[in-house]
Amino acid sequence: MSHSFLIEQWDFSTFPAKRVEPKEPLGLLQENHWYHCQREAKELRHWLLVNDFESGVVDSLLADDTRPRFELFDDQSFLLIMRGVNLNEGATPDDMLSVRILWHKGILISTRKISSKAITDIRQALDEQRGPKTTARLLLAIIDGLNQNIAQFLDGVEEQLFEIEEGNGSNHDLHVIHKRLLKLRRFMKPQRYAHDDFLEVQHPEMEEVELKMRNSLDTVIRINESIDFYLEQIQLIKADIEQEQAEKMNRNTYLFTVIAAIFLPVGFLTGLLGINIGGMPGVDNPMAFWLFCVGLGVTFVFEFMLLRWLRFF
C-alpha cells in the first residue's frame, strides 16, 4: 500500500525518539509509534480500515468539518479533535485549522489538512533530540502547543485594543478584531468541553501526564475568559465611539440651529424688502440702502447679545 498520506513516522520505544523511514507497502500499526498523516489523502482511509478501525471512527477522524470534541471507544481508544490558530505565512489566524488525534493502545495517529505551527515545532524538537519522551507526552505537547499559540495570538489582540483605546486605531481595525474573536470563541467553547471530557475519563495510559493535562485545561479556561473579556471591551469601545459621534452631531446641530436663529429675522427683512412691488419705503432715498444695512447690523448684534444672555452659547 502506498504511504503517500504519511508525512512522518516516529518511534517512541526508546529515547530519544527515532524517525522511521516507512517501507513499501506500509504495514500494520506499530506500538509506541507516532503517525502524522495528510488527512485528505485517499489512501489514509484504506490504511486505517486495514488496521481494524471501525468505519465510524474513521469517518469521525476524516470528516471535513468538525468541532473540538473528545470521544472514547470501547477498546479504550479515543478520538480528540482540537482547533488552533493558523500561523502559516499569508494566512489569517482566525482561519482556524483542525488537528485530529486518534489514540490506540499507545499509538498516536494525528491528521492535518493545513500545517500546524505547534506540530511543526514538535517535529523540529524531535529532530534536535529534545522532544517528548513518550507518545502520551507527545499528545500533551500537541495540546499545549495549540493552546499556547492561541494564547499568544490573544496577547497581540490585547495590545491592538490598547492602541485603539489610545486613539491609534480605526473602526475598521476594531471590526476585524471583533470578527476574529467571534470566530475564535466559536471553537474555544467546545475545546474546553473536550478537555473536560478527556480528564473525566481518567484514561490509564494518560496517568503520567494527567496533572499537566489539568494545567492545559486551565489554559483553555483562561483563553475563553480572555475572549469574553475582550469582546466586552470591544462593546465598551464601540459605545464610547458612538457616544462621541452622537455628541459631535449634537454640537453641530446645535451650532446650525443657533446660526439659523440669528439669520432668520435678517433673512425675513431682506426677503420682505426684496419684493418688486410698489410702495416699498426708501426707493427714492439714496441713503435708504445704507440705513437698511445699519439696521440689519443692529438687529444682528441685538440677537447675538440676547442669545448669549439666554445662555445659548
Image: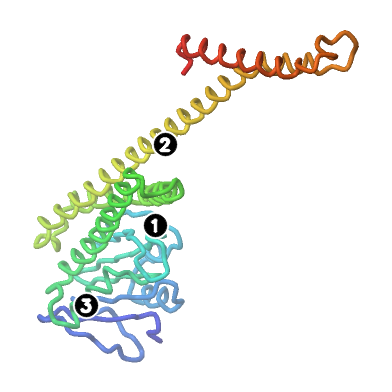
Q: Quadrant of residue 265?
A: top right
Give the label on residue 94, or none.
1
Residue at 37% in and 60% down: 93
How far apart are the alpha carbons under marks 3 and 1?
32 Å
How far apart are the alpha carbons under marks 2 and 1?
25 Å
Q: Could you tell whether 169 is left or right of 283 in the image? A: left
3 or 2: mark nearer the eye:
2
Q: Quadrant of residue 266?
A: top right
The residue singled out by tag 3 in the image is: 33
| Mark nearer the N terminus (2 vs 1) | 1
Q: Say which element carries label 3.
A: strand
Q: Could you tell whether 291 is left or right of 199 in the image? A: right
| Residue 40 sits above or below residue 296 on the image | below
| Residue 298 sits above or below residue 153 on the image | above
Q: Residue furthest bottom?
A: 24
Give the amino acid at mark 2. Ile
Residue at 76% in and 15% down: 288
Dots 3 and 2: beta carbons under 8 Å?
no
Q: Say which element carries label 2.
A: helix
| Residue 196 sits above or below residue 59 on the image | above
Q: Position of residue 168 (x, y in %)?
A: 36, 49
| Mark nearer the N terminus (3 vs 2) | 3
Q: Say which element carries label 1.
A: loop
Residue at 31% in and 59% down: 82
Q: Residue furthest front?
A: 286
| Residue 77 sits above or below residue 24 on the image | above
Give the label on residue 241, or none.
2
Q: Position of residue 162 (x, y in %)?
A: 29, 47
